[in-house]
Image (spheres, rainbow, N blue to C red):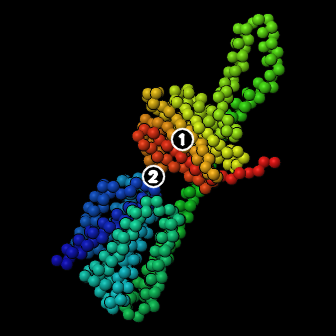
Amino acid sequence: MMTWLIVFSGFAAGSVRMMGCLLLLSRLLSVKEPAKQSITTVAVGAAVISVLLSVTGLSDFYRMTLEILLIVCCASYFQKADRRMSLFVGIFYEIAVFFWQFLFAAWLGVGFRSATFLDYGTGAGQVAVWCLHLSLFVLLLYLLKRPNLGAKEGFRLASAIVIAGFLAVVSLSQQTVLVIADDTLEMWTILAVVLLMAVLVFNMNRQYEVEKELAALKSQQAELLERDYAALHNAYAINAKLFHDFHNHIGVLRQLLVHDKTEEAVQYLDALQAPVRELTDTVWTGEETVDYLINSKAIAAEAQGITYQVQAEFPRHTNLRSADLCAILGNLLDNALEAAGQIPDSEQRFIRLTIRRIHQMLIIKVENTFFTPPEQQEGELKTSKAEAGLHGWGLKSAQTAAEKYDGMVQTSYTGNIFRAIVTLSYQGVSVE
């Protein structure tokens, strides 16, 4: 009877352990949370492993190895996690769990003055096992209730758990109640140090990946800025050339009118107006970059049959850099144009841009209709564009620019209307 209880206990504990690791991977690697397929596979795998070890009499080392392999398979296949990082996390997670299982058993043995807690084949040993797994279950509930747990907070939590384990195993060597072999204590002490190093290495790798992504983001943002600034420069260059030749054009028009050639004069004016027609409906905010972006996107919207509405109240003389405004406005409006342009019925296509200032806060809101609901990948909106290149960096670029001003980019959608709201804190600057 006891044997089957231990087998069932091994199955239940293994299921908790592996589900905990898959949930942890979803947070650490920003992938999907465990779904029904993962839960079923883990439960079946835990049952098979528990029965197999009971029949063969193999040690917990083989249980750990089989569970790691199952975790990696579920994470990579069902959650689309990176296999290499899943293996790294899985190995050290399993080591940490069995390390803490030993600590629970040892300290319960010290407290009750009984070495039977270290024998997991006894009732006392199973008490130690489930003290750990109940604690692990509580930790998992905490993670589920904190879906927005940040990387820094997660690193501090993991470091605190590992350091507490290191201090607990060192303290075991000082107690005299329970006799524990020196080589066992040395092994767990070394593993505690290895776990601490693993947490540090993972954090360093995460920071490296973030820095690499930021470098790529800056490169993509520079290309986007270069594109918009080149267009802005060309538009104003055409305008400057026309003003430079203004007296010549006046002379030609005077001659045409003097000789009653009205029709030729109108045609001449139409030819002059064509290059600067894009600037005739300018919404003047006082910021050239904002003016250009608003109106160039208005022209693009008109070409696609998209209703384009603008309400702009922009502060003058602030610390908001043109490059950052270009990254925010340009990318949000580009995304809105792409989404609204996919709607078959042109009467349902619209974009609304609202810019408001509230004290020292600037609010930029872009609303647009869409045809296909936006998809999410790894917690972020996924571009619907088929081509690669600059696509998919828009919101990241806007978010990076907003963070410079203690701001953020928030997105939501209801029905067929998508909203992107940017908040920026700004300061006035003196102009001499």
Q: Is residue 77 above or below residue 335?
A: below
Residue 421 spot, x, y in % from top left: 53, 46
Question: Taking 20 as reference, is 394 left or right?
Answer: right
Residue 399 or 1: which is nearer the viewer? Answer: 399
Identified at 75% across, 6% down, the residue is 261
Q: Residue furthest front?
A: 359
The residue that label 1 is drawn on is 366
**Mark 2, other Cα within 10 Å: few <14 / some 14–19 / many ≥20:** some
**Rendered location of residue 14, percent (x, y):** 31, 68
Q: Which quarter of the picture shows residue 310?
A: top right
First reached walking from the N terminus: tag 2 or tag 1: 1
Q: Quadrant of residue 146?
A: bottom left
Q: Amino acid at mark 1?
A: Val
Closer to us: mark 2 or mark 1?
A: 1
The residue that disc 2 covers is 378
Figure quadrant of the N terminus: bottom left
Of residues 63 and 169, which is closer to you in this image?
A: 169
**At 45% from the left edge and 78% from the top edge, which residue is drawn?**
165
Is residue 321 at all visible to an observer of this figure?
yes
Left or right relative to 428: residue 72: left
